Every structure is written in C-alpha cells, then in structure tokens.
Image (spheres, grey):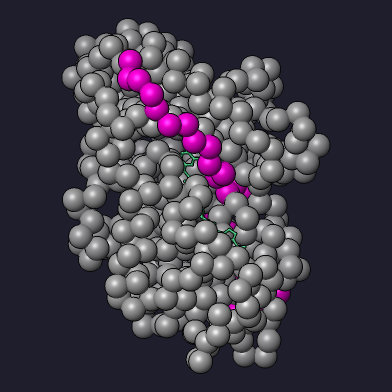
C-alpha cells in the first residue's frame, strides 16, 4: 500500500465504533482512512441483538454481585460462565470487577454511564436524518420480564437509579397487562418493566455496512489491512500493517476486543477482556414479536432482525482463542421455545461474538497516556451499538482538540 500523501487520521477497526468514528471525523473536515483486517462489520458488530439500550446505565458489577455470581457459575450453561481453561487468566480482571462493585465506584459508574447514554441518544437522533436512518430502525421499546414478586422487588433499586437519571419506564404487574404489550408469553412472567425509548436497528450488520458505505460515499478511504504495531514519531504515528506502513497525523484505535494488543505495543496496559456471547438467528418467524424482550433472570433477549428473530445473550469468560461452545446458544433457544407460546421456528444460524469489556463496564475513550496522537475508543462491552454515535462525537472532539461534551475522566485509559 503506497500513499502519495499521509492520511490525516487513520481509524483501526471497522466495527460499529470505528465506522461511526470515521464518519464523524470525515464530517468534521478531516481526511480519514479506515482500516480493518477483514472488512466492515466483520466481528462483534455484525451479530449483536441490535438494540440501542439507552436505559442500561448500571455497570454489570453491581453491589452484592459477588454473592450471586458463584450460584450462576455452578451452572456451566447458565447466564454467566468461566471456561475452566481460562479461569486463571481472567482472575486479575475478576478482581477489578469485584472492586468496581463497591458502592462508591458503582455510583460513579452509573453517573458516567448515564452521561454517555444521554449523549449517545442525542447523537443518534442527530445522525439518523443525515444517513437516511429512520427506515433502518424500529422504535418499539423493550419489555424486561420478571418471574415473581420477589424477583421484581429485587429489581426496584435499578429502576430507581434509572428514575433518578430521568429515564422513562412503566412498571407492570400481571399477565394481562404484560400481554397488552407483548402477547404470547408464558404465564410464568408476572411482572415487567417497559422502556419505551429503546430503539432497535433492523439489522446491526446492515446498519454498520450502511454507515461504512456512507463514509466511502462522502470521500473516506476504506482499506483491508491488519495493523500490527503503532510507532509514535515526532509529528505523526507510523502504522505498521500487513500490507505496508502508513503515516498518520492521528490514529484512532477502535479494534474492539483486540484493541489492547495495539495499546500494549505503545506501553499502555489496559485490562480489556472479552465477554463472549451467543445467539441463534431465524430468517423468518411466525411469532408476533412486538418489542425487544429481555428475560432478566436467564440473561438473554429476543429481538427482531430483518423479517426474522434473534435469540441470544449470555456471558462466557473464555478469551479470544478458545473454540465456541454452541451449547450455550442451544440452551437459550430451548428456553425461548418454552417462554414464547407457539414459537417453534426451524433451522437458524448460530453465532458467537466477542464483547470488548473492561471490568467497570465503561469503555475507554481518550488519548493514550504514552502516545498523544493515538485516541482510544474501545471496550463498550454490552453497549457498543448503543454508544456508537456518542462515542463518535467524542472521538471527533478529541481529534479536533475541542472540549468533549461530557467529562471523559471516568473513561480515561489510565484509570486502572
Ligand atoms: C450476543 C451479543 C449481543 C449484543 N447485543 C448488543 C445490543 O443489543 N446493543 C448493543 O449496544 N451492543 C450489543 N452487543 C455488544 C456490541 O456488539 C459490541 O459492544 C460492539 O459490536 C463492539 O463494536 P466494536 O466496533 O468496538 O468492535 P467489533 O465490532 O468487534 O469491531 C472491531 C473490528 O476491528 C477489527 N480489528 C481487530 N484488530 C485489528 C487489527 N489489528 N487490524 C485491523 N483491524 C482489526 C476487526 O476485524 C473488527 O472488524 C452485543 C454483543 C454480543 C456478543
């Protein structure tokens, strides 16, 4: 790859974070080159549940989580699992996860996540009309289901945290009231919370590709190359790729669950791990799904994708190398068949994706402490699609040297 003129900004990774950031940078007037080792939407951004889950402001590490976790871990196919071959490797991350659940850190986490959610929601509304977005989304809200009075009551502190942040929701009691929002659910679900402001994309892979096409149509460059190292120079960063070296004025690392490899080469140790998730997608389905449905206790969701449905979720801590265990997708599907009356589609495509996750559930958004021309934008965990438009605006502000709209201190790469 030879370049007559160094591109001003190189964005590494064409998942939803990289593509959104590249588009925002281009629209801010920069020359931008987007690099991916495979192509647009090659990894986690292709197969997720497709939700802009703006109400999910709580970190995973809630106070008391370490009391509940062992019970979940006893079930190897339960909502949370650690692959035995990975247990020792994940231990330092788990320690940080436990620390993140201490009350003061948890409260700070909720505040930080809320600020990013508020920005991201507004940023998405700004983006939609500029990319012909309205036809590619659904505004159908989300129904979170509970199976007993006690389970519902245990969720009340989370609803209170949302209320304090001005998030809209309705709490619902009784099967009849639930059926008015989503008919066809098993009678085991006695309570629910409905969040009307969730938005879903029609298909997350298509959405990411659409933004990628928009980026190219507006003059951005898109190349296939694996980035192997970053070397800061006096007024540039050398980007060493599988097809040659490039020089950039600034670099954005948005390589999802693989980002820490590049950061480590610069001397930044960031405790990024992956929470692997599983799902099964059916191209068509007779079940009348009217909203995004979340089965809280079981750690999975059912969402519309295209003309069909996707059933998935779960968290498996197993790193980037171990082969998938698709029994996890099967168990979720089996549960969905028993929770949704008449839901019995045939076929289905199984998928596993690598959520890029920091122990405090907050992404890293900020300049590298060791290389000022490198901006990090990764680690969005369960919420990368949700926070993509907001993250893109923050990256554009950083690249331009502007003060970002929200404080980036809680997202700083050096916070660990
Ligand atoms: C089962 C499941 C359900 C989910 N549901 C939702 C949801 O409903 N809503 C939501 O907001 N989030 C959801 N998520 C999370 C979301 O998918 C991720 O947070 C998001 O996709 C991360 O995007 P990304 O761009 O950071 O990473 P990715 O999409 O993984 O993109 C990273 C890109 O970087 C490239 N890359 C990596 N290393 C290099 C390198 N060295 N050189 C060049 N390229 C490189 C890869 O090829 C890849 O294309 C879900 C995740 C899973 C697993």
* Quarter of the view holding residue 230: bottom right
State the residue at coordinates (47%, 60%).
Answer: 39
Furthest toward the right, the residue is: 88
Of 188 and 211, nearer the camera is 211
State the residue at coordinates (18%, 19%).
Answer: 180
Where is residue 293? Give x, y as percent: 34, 27
Furthest toward the top, the residue is: 187
Does the segment drawn in magenta span residue 366? yes
Of 375 and 22, nearer the camera is 22
State the residue at coordinates (52%, 87%).
Answer: 3
The N terminus is located in which quarter? bottom right
Q: Is 394 placed left or right of 323 in the picture?
A: left
86 over 410 or under it: above or below: above
Residue 105 makes an appearance in the image: no
Where is residue 207? Give x, y as percent: 33, 53
State the residue at coordinates (62%, 49%).
Answer: 358
Does the segment drawn in magenta span residue 142? no
* Quarter of the view holding residue 226: bottom right
* Quarter of the view holding residue 73: top right
Residue 389 makes an appearance in the image: yes
Q: How many marks?
A: 0
The C terminus is located in which quarter? bottom right
Where is residue 195? Give x, y as percent: 30, 35
- Magenta segment: 344-373
Where is residue 400? Give x, y as percent: 45, 81
């Amino acid at each position: 790859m030879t370049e007559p003129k160094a591109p001003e900004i190189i964005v590494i990774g064409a998942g939803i974070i990289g593509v959104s950031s590249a588009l925002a940078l281009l629209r801010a007037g920069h020359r931008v080159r987007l690099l991916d080792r495979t192509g647009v939407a090659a990894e986690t951004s292709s197969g997720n549940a497709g939700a802009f889950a703006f109400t999910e402001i709580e970190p995973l590490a809630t106070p008391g989580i370490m009391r509940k976790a062992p019970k979940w871990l006893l079930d190897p196919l339960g909502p949370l699992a650690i692959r035995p071959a990975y247990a020792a490797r994940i231990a330092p991350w788990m320690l940080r996860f436990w620390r993140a659940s201490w009350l003061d850190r948890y409260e700070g986490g909720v505040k930080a996540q809320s600020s990013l959610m508020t920005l991201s929601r507004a940023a998405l509304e700004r983006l939609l009309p500029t990319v012909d977005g309205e036809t590619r989304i659904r505004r159908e809200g989300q129904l979170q289901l509970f199976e007993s009075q006690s389970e519902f009551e245990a969720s009340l502190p989370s609803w209170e945290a949302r209320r304090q942040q001005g998030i809209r929701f309705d709490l619902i009691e009784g099967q009849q009231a639930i059926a008015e929002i989503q008919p066809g659910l098993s009678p085991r679900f006695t309570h629910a919370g409905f969040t009307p402001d969730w938005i879903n994309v029609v298909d997350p892979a298509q959405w990411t590709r659409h933004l990628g096409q928009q980026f190219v149509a507006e003059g951005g460059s898109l190349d296939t190359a694996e980035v192997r190292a970053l070397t800061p120079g006096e007024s540039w960063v050398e980007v060493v790729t599988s097809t040659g070296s490039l020089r950039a004025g600034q670099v954005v690392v948005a390589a999802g669950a693989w980002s820490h490899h590049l950061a480590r080469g610069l001397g930044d140790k960031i405790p990024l791990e992956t929470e692997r998730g599983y799902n099964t997608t059916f191209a068509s389905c007779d079940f009348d799904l009217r909203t995004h449905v979340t089965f809280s206790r079981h750690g999975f969701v059912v969402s519309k994708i295209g003309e069909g449905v996707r059933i998935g979720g779960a968290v498996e801590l197993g790193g980037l190398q171990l082969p998938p265990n698709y029994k996890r997708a099967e168990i979720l599907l089996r549960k969905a068949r028993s929770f949704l009356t008449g839901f019995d589609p045939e076929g289905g495509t199984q998928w596993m994706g690598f959520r890029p996750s920091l122990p405090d559930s907050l992404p890293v958004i900020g300049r590298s402490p060791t290389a000022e021309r490198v901006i990090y934008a990764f680690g969005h965990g369960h919420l990368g699609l949700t926070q993509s438009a907001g993250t893109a605006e923050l990256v554009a502000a950083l690249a331009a040297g502007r003060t970002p709209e929200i404080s980036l201190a809680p997202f700083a790469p050096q916070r660990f």
